[in-house]
Amino acid sequence: MALGTIALSIALLGLALASFGLTLALAGGSWFYVALGLGVLASGVELVRRRQNGLRIYALVLAAAFVWTLGEVGFDKWQWIPRGALILLVGFVLCLPFVVRRLRDAPERPWKLSLRNGPLVLRAVVLLIAALSAAAWFVDPVETRGRLPKVAEAGPAAVDPSGVPFPADDWVAYGGTNLGQRYSALADITPGTVRGLTVAWEHHTGDLRGDSRTDSKEFTFEATPIKVNGLLYLCTPHNIVEALEPETGKRVWAFDPQMARDSQYQHQTCRGVSYNDSAAYAPPAETDPAAAGAIAAAVAECPRRIIAASVDARLYALNAETGALCRTFGANGFVDLKAQMPNLRRASYQQTSAPLVTRNLIVLGSAIADNYYADNPSGVIRAFDVRTGAIVWKFDAGKPDETAPLEPGALYEPNSAVAWTQFSADEALGLVYVPFGNRAPDQVGVSRSKADEALVDALAALDLETGRLTWAFRTTHHDLWDRDNPSQPVLLTLPQGDGTVPAILIPTKVGNVWVLDRRTGAPIRPVSEVSVSTRTDIPGEAPSPVQPMSSLSFAPAALTEADMWGVTPFDQIQCRLAFRSNRYDGNPFTPPQASEGAIIWPGNIGVFNWGSVAVDPVHHWMIATPQYLPYLYRLLPRPANEPDRRLIATDPDSTPGNENLGGPYAVSIAHMRSALGVPCNAPPWGVRVGVNLADGTTAWKHRNGTVAGQKIGGVAVPIPFEMGILAHGGTLTTAGGVAFTAATLDDRIRGYDMQTGEVLWTRTLPAGGQATPMTYRGKDGRQYVVIAAGGHGSLGTTPGDSVIAFRLD
């Protein structure tokens, strides 16, 4: 390439940087890119004249940019990229001999020490920055390296202090047990042996996404299998239940409920099934004879049963041995969960989480489409008899004091707060724990009464026998951000003073991990109320002036312009401009506006989501994968006389996502990304952490996952840079000291040391592993680790239909 072409390109680069930088500066942002662009432009002009002064100017520009970068972001190599990678590459080209030889005043002695020796000055600056960049690979200001302490007196405990046996040979519920710990007492796989894990078997369910006219875009395989009754049970996105041989993955039976397909389902997934063994049932003496007879007939038909719920809102029971419908359950094997439900509209009422089976009850909530409609079906929580399907009690946040089943012809309370995620239970205390979310519309609270707000974003403890509210703990005040409680509560016993306390953890989208006494809801770890912004342009809106924050929190630090990221200076300037052009009040609770966009940080995917956290209940550790992405919200006013007018998508057959039809506002929700498709916030976008719950301290933190396969401007990244990526799914912990996670967007499963967080083992999966691993012991005496790998539709991971088991070779 001719020097003239290179020089002209550099001049144009400088002109572009100065122009883009001026736009940012005039919006109140940094002026540095203006100065940088002018410096590059001046260098290019001098090089067009073929004068070595152009190299001296470029060296000064490089040095200034590097000093400015250190001042803004310190020694974080990933934040150096948008500020310096492009101009450093240009500097490297200018150092090459073929450029220097074409200068009119090229020095006769190119290595002579002199500040007038342009080539030497530039080469020295480039070499210095390159050396510091290399050194930066061994420094990471994001990471914390430490070690979780073991409890000295802890032995190989087999039973939780609450009396529940830890999972070992079996994995009997979605979270291992109804305590939701995601912990196994198996210890064959240790930090010393985990590298010997190899694929034991791979099973293909055959259930893949079909035509876009019949299947949702968010078609996801998020199932966690259970292992009980000598079989492995799981469900697919179309709610097909399968039973597999745990040692071989061979299908024993399958049942297809013929789910009604619809492309408008907001979430087309099935996270798990549940199990009940009634084989030894003996009715109490006071049981009504007719009821006792019905139960006896149900038990005789299906002494052991699998309980499942479908996306199209049916609850059904299967014979665990054969997969046949239990015809004595409900009406010919099914309970219609939409019966007596108000405000039913197309694809608005769904089931996605595994029903909770505890004592003789099935307890479940529902997944109601966010922001489709302003007036939704009821968020009622219902308990059914696990053998007959008869409703036993209900709990409706709209009428919390009325827990008896509805009379025929009556309807549940419309638009009451909903609980869509997995529930937990403590049978010894007789309580079921329900994490409630918001009521529609999520981002506008003008129509909510004080009574409505009482259980919005609350963790509620309900009496197992009656459904009565025992206590509730609010995690957000007047939610305007979709800050629902998305995670299964985790129950364990923690040290307190000279004794112990039965605790419950509830991770939230904000990043708080609430640590409460599960008997009363009283905080164990301190809670504070922090002042937040309340300015709004929505008539009648009254944002709360304070919000609760936990002392155990992974809420991110406030965003600044310096936190904006990109691959080049240009898309970083774009993200800086977006930061300056949208409202952000420096906390997670900036109220959405109609007149301007609002930066919601963290966004509504949350720091924590349905994957929850995992614990080691013996040593009192918590292992988690917080994630960090900002979103842009804007409320779109709808004409008062056009309640069903679409403001986002005009096609009446398209998904009514974010339209809030029937309400005064639609809501625009978008990832805050650059034109190249990368998040505007600097990495890491996901980390893994190890917390000592005994004192609430974080012992270690590491970037979690690589960017391999992620697209920049439509081109997949080929190199697995460990920058820390989103992890949408859960974690497994084991008594062997190894945790497993497969939820990162790079289609890999990892095993890491629970004490230090260091990765010990990793394997590439055939599809995205946006699920939670589980483990068990087979009849062959060996420990297996199993993950569903089928990808996630809206996150764009590789689709598939695999269930993969690993065991020690």
Image (cartoon, rainbow, N blue to C red):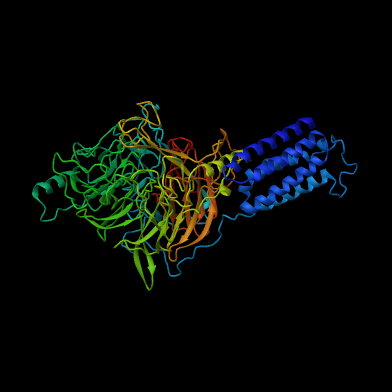
Residue 138 falls in which quadrant of the image? bottom right
Instruction: Give the farthest residue toward the left.
Output: 289
**How far across and down, in percent of the image, does residue 579 sit?**
53, 44
The number of callouts visible is 0
Q: Residue 245 versus residue 601: which sits nearer the camera?
A: 601
**How far across and down, in percent of the image, does residue 106 sit?**
87, 39
**How far across and down, in percent of the image, does residue 440 sit?**
31, 42
Lateral position of residue 220 relative to residue 700, left or right: left
| Picture quarter with the N terminus | top right
Residue at the spot 37% in from the left edge and 35% down from the top edge: 657
Lateral position of residue 380 relative to residue 19, left or right: left
Q: Is residue 250 visible?
A: yes
Q: Work out whether 672 lies above or below 620.
A: above
Q: Is residue 568 visible?
A: no
**How far across and down, in percent of the image, does residue 698 sit?**
49, 61
Residue at the spot 79% in from the left edge and 41% down from the top edge: 55
Lateral position of residue 513 relative to residue 273, left or right: right
Instruction: Give the farthest residue toward the right.
Output: 108
Instruction: Give the farthest residue toward the bottom.
Output: 498
